[in-house]
Image (cartoon, rainbow, N blue to C red):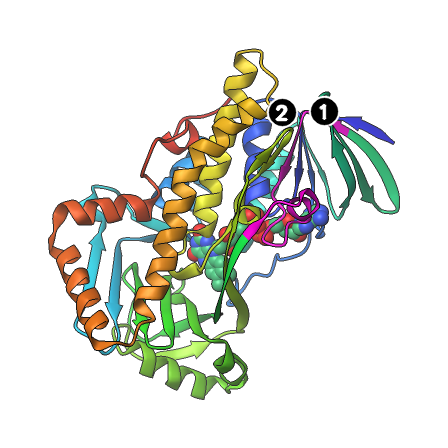
Amino acid sequence: MCCETDVLIVGGGLVGASLACALGQAGVRTRVVEASSPDADRSGGYDERSIALAQGSQRIFAGLGLWPKLAAAACPIHTIHVSDRGHFGFTRLRREQEGVPALGYVATAAVLGEVLRHGMQQQQSVQVHSPAQLAAFDTDAEGVRAEIDQDGVTTQCTAKLLVAADGAHSAVREQLGIRTTRRDYRQTAIIANVSTDKAHDNVAYERFTDSGPLALLPMSGQRSALVWTVHEQQCAEIMALEDGEFLRRLQQRFGYRLGRFTRVGARNAFPLQLLQAAESVRPRLALIGNAVHTLHPIAGQGFNLGLRDVAALVDVILDARGDGRDYGDLAVLRRYAQWRQADQRRVALLTDSMVRLFGQPLPAVAWLRDTGMLALDVCAPAKRWFGRMTMGRAGRLPRLARGLTVK
Ligand SMILES: Cc1cc2nc3c(=O)[nH]c(=O)nc-3n(C[C@H](O)[C@H](O)[C@H](O)COP(=O)(O)OP(=O)(O)OC[C@H]3O[C@@H](n4cnc5c(N)ncnc54)[C@H](O)[C@@H]3O)c2cc1C
């Protein structure tokens, strides 16, 4: 079988699917190759996994016309409370100070996936191959040639541009021999949903502890999504604890700001690393999302950053199309790479510095960081800068990030 498309996206995770929705709306013929089956990860109920969406991501989803569906299931964040366990430092960000209805939103990955799947299905110009594999690809001045394996059938596909949205272990990036810098944090994030006997009042908590940061994100139904980072050696023991003992340890780490922890659901563990690809474009190729940057989840920035890659790449493609230029051309794609570089570096540096700074047990360092946190709490301009970073509104913004449509 043969097919011809404009953009071939490898990886239909949250980032790849978002790009497909945007390109589809702009009438760009798009094919997505996704390894997992469309029924995977539709788990609902108490244990559904959550993602914190920055306010900037809310705008991008609004621009894509997907926000009304997401809003119905998302929990708004009104306040972010950051504290340092066993020390005096804390800082708060409030929606009133930022002049926004919410600093961000917590949505479940299942709802996000469903909304994006539906968003792709709505677009006639988007075709999804799932479960399917990219078996081979090569590029030349004319375009991309790829082989897609699905249900034992191989389809030969040609495209103007191939986008690698295939995650941290990107096979496309590996095949191209793109160098990466990595830092193994020797930490594992244990995630689970928990219930507390006090209402969360739409407050997201980030608490730094001597074993790593601990976040609690407000969810619907009086639940909070826990992201508890522990040293890798502690992971197996904590994962094996029976629920009562797990909650007791969590209470000890977090304290009583949310009252008593009363329930914990299924736990999952994710080893953590920082990964940065040295290049994000080659002729006829672009990398987005985790394929180009994989971050520590300390500030819940990974998907938000990937979504901003999507918004910028869409702008570059549409501008080139409007000017009658080939958007597989390296000179065009470099605009995307240059545009994204500062934001990608800034967010990677911010999250990595936070991990390092709050991982320091030295009393002098603890004193300095806690003084810094208190200063941030009372210094309005510094807080506004921090707020813009957290909400994904720093730097030059593409159309979608300004809430505009791409139709
Ligand atoms: C514990 C934890 C908490 C987090 N919390 C947040 C948060 O609150 N907010 C936030 O913004 N971010 C958060 N993140 C980060 C966020 O989850 C990721 O940045 C985001 O999911 C990356 O999406 P992606 O689509 O780039 O990559 P992935 O989600 O890795 O998707 C890649 C897709 O490509 C497919 N694929 C791979 N190889 C192939 C192939 N050869 N052929 C076809 N398909 C292929 C895979 O099946 C997969 O579906 C968190 C991360 C962790 C670990």
Marks 1 and 2: in contact by CB < 8 Å? yes
Q: Is residue 171 magenta?
A: yes
- Residue 255, percent across and down? 28, 78
Q: Amino acid at mark 1?
A: Gly
Instruction: Out of 57 and 220, give the one closest to the viewer.
Output: 57
Residue drawn where x is 22% and y is 72% of the image: 366
- Residue 168, percent across and down? 58, 53
Instruction: Out of 315 and 340, give the one closest to the viewer.
Output: 340
Q: Amino acid at mark 2?
A: Gly
Residue drawn where x is 29% and y is 47% of the image: 102
- Residue 390, percent across and down? 32, 49
Q: Which segment did they paint magenta?
A: 158-180
Residue 108 appears in view = no
Q: Residues within 10 Å of mark 2 (few under 14, many from 20)?
A: many
Residue 380 appears in view = yes
- The picture quadrant where one finds residue 340 is top left
Disc number for residue 368: none
Relative side of 324 to 224, left or right: right
Q: What is the secondary structure assignment of the residue under circle 2?
A: loop
Label 1 belongs to which residue? 143
Q: Is residue 290 above or below residue 352?
A: above
Q: Is residue 240 above or below residue 73?
A: below
Q: What is the secondary structure assignment of the residue under circle 1?
A: loop
Disc number for residue 328: 2
